[in-house]
Image (tube, rainbow, N blue to C red):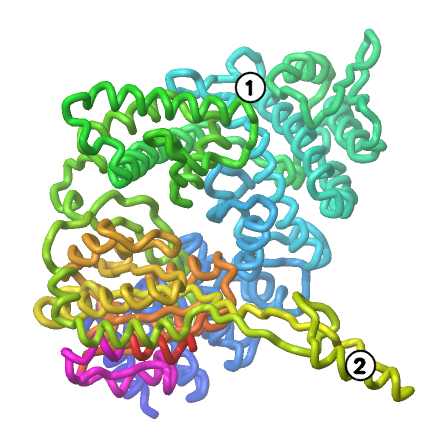
């Protein structure tokens, strides 16, 4: 093929954008000497790189010529995926550095050499940290390990040890240490009462030395805690730690400081940890020791440690030991803690106030409203104080209203536990504010943004990867999804729907009643609830006849319990405006009424958004939330919003279903059209990302199904959901009945 034809093909691929002709000419002048196979291979990946970065694409073509001298074109796709990964993590400069070092950065790890990229094991680390901590930390990239108490920052790659498995294990140790630092409470210790950050190193002449020594003491404390909590991990990691500590070397001829730090840390790692006291270092007057280092107050020990080490001659370089010790950015951590506490306070006040109103804590008490509020506030404060004194550590799960114990929703109980874990107690101001808002008729926070006022309080933001089929890889943390709660409205919609579909609803209820938990007796069991008289008579007959009697002489009562968790994900894009949106809401009312009969756990969420930075999921009913006027009001409030980016909400509800322990986990998507957003999330790209999200759900044990009202939907639904995993509703009035019938068939 002529060079001009290749150039024409390039322009077609990058259309409709029009790059500078001189840049294209320079690139193709370089490519002119390449054979046809090389040209075809390089140009085949332009479509994946150009939409991400034009400059990156030109760099790829330039470096690709050199790269194909070192590996075959069969590896080019993998190389491109790693280029895009580096671009997202470290920008254009980082991607260019990766491309320039083909042998060391790309081929070396493929040969089984030491290096490991964190992205390769990030999914494993997500499950690991959740397993040991019960929390979902985020991960991000930094030169040295650190944490701000919600995100753990790690190097993007490690080649510290000769073996790849050792480097993977070292990542696990670093993650564990950063979690341990959070658990130790050190970040809260440096917060001043006014929310500022104490300058804990200003009192020392050498701030750099004091910061390093602080890291050393904090490592000792945290590692000792890991020995108690995760003895296997700590035992296996000691050899790796010693290797790193030995890399602390003197800067000059005087070695005392470097040797002191080495001896200090190695001695700690090698001692018998069953001893109550740990000898840490020696000085002119004898020995300094710390009893039970897991209980050490680092800020109290630091002055003595600094005094002993700073008097020694010489200086040192930490080398790779700085990966073990990490760094402590107290300013960043303090800001994260402050924002988290503000969010938790706001959510606690709004959620508890709304719950109190829902339970009627102030009904029929208008004449004595202030007394009722004061009494309720006193009861709440007393309850929290009593349970705090009992040190139950299990969170509050009930409150007293009119001398009656009312169970708290799981969301509020979990939030209370999170606040207690952070602050050690529920501040009185939080309780007073909740009682005050409930008494004043306010069940949510006020907003400056009037658009937000109609849809409720954003509770949290979640980053999600997005699948790019053009590169056969993920865009890491590409989309940001916020979960909000629809504010219920008062209307006659639900009552009107129930009246409109009364005959169908009666039929549905009868059908769903048949799905309830059933009880049956099974005869001839070895143990059970009663004697099986028929089996006993036969056994007596066999005995008299000289035969061996059966030992199956009992009747057992079996309970065939349904163990189902279902999530309904409802399209709230602007295309649902009009009769389509009304039909979807009517269908939700009927399915909710039917599910209340059978007793299955179910949740309802809507989704919409605009661009990757503002994907939104709207809470209508949580999985364990009771169906009642509040939920009915949220169903009535469902309305059209913006676009249809399906991938993030599917991944979000899949994560929620993964956290349940039900035998059957079902995700039902209700939509009227293709996935599409304002940006480049459209066409094949959007379909492939949605399909990938559904495959991820299936891989985690979540079965997905789609109900669509789009008359042109046949060509892509089978590709996204799989054949047999969707129904097409061409008659909108039949949607409510079809939806309920579909659910019955899926779960019976």
Q: In this view, does 472 lie to the left or right of 239?
A: left
Point out the image quarter for the C terminus.
bottom left
Q: Where is residue 42 in the image (x, y as percent from the top left)?
A: 41, 78
Q: Where is residue 512 in the image (x, y as percent from the top left)?
A: 35, 73
* For residue 143, above or below residue 632: above
> Disc 1 designates what residue?
207
- Residue at 57% over, 23% down: 208
Q: Is residue 677 left or right of residue 297?
A: left
Point out the image quarter for the N terminus.
bottom left
Q: Position of residue 59 (x, y in %)?
A: 39, 65
Instruction: Give the residues drawn in magenta, as a range.
Output: 711-739
- In reply to whether residue 50 is colored magenta, the answer given is no
* For residue 250, above or below residue 428: below
Verify CB contact (< 8 Å) between mark 2 and mark 1.
Answer: no
Dot 2 alpha-carbon crowd within 10 angstroms: few under 14, some 14 to 19, many 20 or more = some
Looking at the image, tell me whether mark 2 or mark 1 is earlier in sequence order: 1
Q: In this view, does 186 lie to the left or right of 731?
A: right
Q: Is residue 589 left or right of residue 432?
A: left
Given residues 557 and 390, the one toward you in this image is: 557
Residue at the limit of the structure toward the right, as seen here: 546
Mark number for residue 168? none
Q: Judge whether residue 63 can be spotted in this image.
A: no
Q: Judge whether residue 331 can be spotted in this image.
A: yes
Given residues 403 and 535, the one toward you in this image is: 535
- Residue at 49% over, 48% down: 136
* For residue 291, above or below residue 130: above
- Residue at 42% over, 75% down: 747
> Disc 2 designates what residue?
539
Dot 1 alpha-carbon crowd within 10 angstroms: few under 14, some 14 to 19, many 20 or more = few
């Amino acid at each position: 093929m002529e060079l001009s034809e290749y150039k024409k093909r390039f322009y077609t691929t990058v259309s409709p954008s029009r790059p500078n002709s001189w840049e294209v000419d320079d690139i193709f002048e370089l490519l002119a000497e390449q054979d046809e196979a090389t040209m075809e291979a390089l140009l085949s990946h332009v479509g994946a790189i150009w939409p991400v970065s034009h400059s990156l694409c030109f760099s790829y073509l330039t470096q690709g010529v050199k790269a194909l001298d070192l590996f075959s074109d069969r590896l080019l796709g993998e190389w491109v995926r790693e280029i895009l990964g580096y671009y997202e993590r470290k920008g254009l400069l980082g991607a260019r550095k990766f491309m320039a070092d083909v042998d060391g950065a790309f081929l070396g790890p493929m040969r089984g050499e030491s290096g490991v990229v964190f992205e390769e094991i990030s999914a494993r680390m997500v499950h690991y940290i959740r397993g040991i901590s019960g929390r979902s930390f985020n991960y991000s990239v930094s030169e040295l390990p650190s944490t701000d108490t919600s995100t753990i920052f790690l190097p993007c790659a490690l080649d510290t040890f000769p073996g790849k498995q050792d480097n993977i294990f070292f990542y696990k140790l670093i993650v564990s240490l950063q979690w341990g630092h959070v658990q130790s409470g050190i970040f809260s210790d440096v917060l001043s009462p006014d929310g500022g950050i104490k300058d804990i190193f200003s009192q020392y002449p050498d701030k750099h030395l004091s910061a390093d020594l602080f890291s050393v003491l904090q490592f000792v404390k945290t590692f000792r805690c890991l020995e108690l909590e995760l003895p296997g991990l700590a035992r296996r990691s000691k050899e790796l730690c010693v290797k790193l500590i030995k890399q602390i070397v003197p800067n000059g001829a005087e070695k005392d400081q470097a040797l002191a730090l080495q001896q200090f840390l190695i001695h700690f790692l090698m001692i018998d940890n069953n001893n109550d006291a740990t000898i840490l270092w020696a000085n002119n007057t004898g020995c300094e020791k710390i009893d039970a280092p897991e209980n050490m107050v680092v800020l109290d020990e630091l002055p003595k440690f600094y005094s002993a080490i700073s008097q020694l001659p010489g200086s040192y370089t930490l080398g790779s030991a700085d990966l073990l010790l990490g760094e402590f950015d107290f300013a960043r951590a303090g800001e994260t803690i402050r924002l988290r506490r503000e969010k938790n306070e706001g959510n606690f006040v709004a959620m508890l106030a709304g719950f109190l109103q829902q339970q009627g804590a102030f009904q029929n008490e208008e004449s004595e409203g202030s007394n009722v509020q004061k009494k309720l506030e006193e009861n709440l404060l007393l309850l929290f104080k009593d349970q705090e004194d009992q040190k139950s550590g299990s969170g509050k799960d009930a409150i007293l209203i009119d001398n009656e114990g009312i169970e708290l929703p799981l969301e509020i109980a979990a939030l209370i536990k999170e606040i207690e874990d952070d602050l050690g107690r529920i501040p009185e101001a939080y309780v007073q504010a909740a009682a005050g808002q409930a008494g004043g008729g306010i069940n949510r926070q006020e907003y400056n943004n009037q658009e937000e006022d109609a849809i409720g309080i954003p509770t949290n933001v979640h980053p999600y990867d997005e699948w790019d089929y053009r590169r056969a890889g993920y865009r890491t943390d590409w989309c940001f999804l916020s979960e909000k709660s629809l504010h219920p409205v008062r209307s006659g919609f639900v009552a009107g729907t129930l009246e409109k579909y009364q005959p169908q609803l009666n039929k549905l209820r009868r059908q769903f009643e048949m799905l309830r938990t059933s009880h049956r007796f099974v005869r001839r069991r070895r143990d059970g609830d009663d004697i099986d008289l028929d089996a006993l008579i036969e056994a007596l007959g066999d005995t008299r006849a000289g035969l061996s009697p059966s030992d199956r002489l009992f009747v057992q009562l079996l309970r065939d319990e349904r163990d189902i968790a279902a999530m309904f994900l409802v399209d709230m894009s602007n295309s649902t405006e009009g009769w389509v949106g009304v039909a979807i809401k009517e269908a939700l009312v009927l399915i909710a009424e039917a599910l209340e009969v059978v007793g299955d756990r179910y949740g309802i969420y809507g989704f919409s958004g605009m661009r990757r930075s503002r994907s939104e999921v709207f809470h209508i009913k949580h999985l364990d939330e009771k169906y009642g006027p509040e939920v009915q009001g949220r169903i009535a409030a469902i309305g059209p919003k913006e676009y249809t980016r399906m991938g993030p909400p599917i991944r979000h509800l899949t994560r929620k279903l993964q956290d349940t322990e039900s035998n059957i986990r079902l995700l039902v998507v209700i939509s009227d059209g293709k996935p599409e957003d304002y940006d480049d999330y459209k066409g094949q790209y959007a379909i492939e990302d949605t399909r990938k999200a559904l495959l991820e759900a299936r891989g985690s044990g979540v079965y997905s199904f789609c109900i669509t009202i789009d008359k042109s939907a046949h060509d892509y639904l089978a590709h996204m959901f799989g054949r047999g995993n969707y129904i097409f509703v061409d008659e909108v009035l039949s949607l409510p009945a079809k939806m309920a019938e579909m659910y019955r068939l899926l779960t019976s």
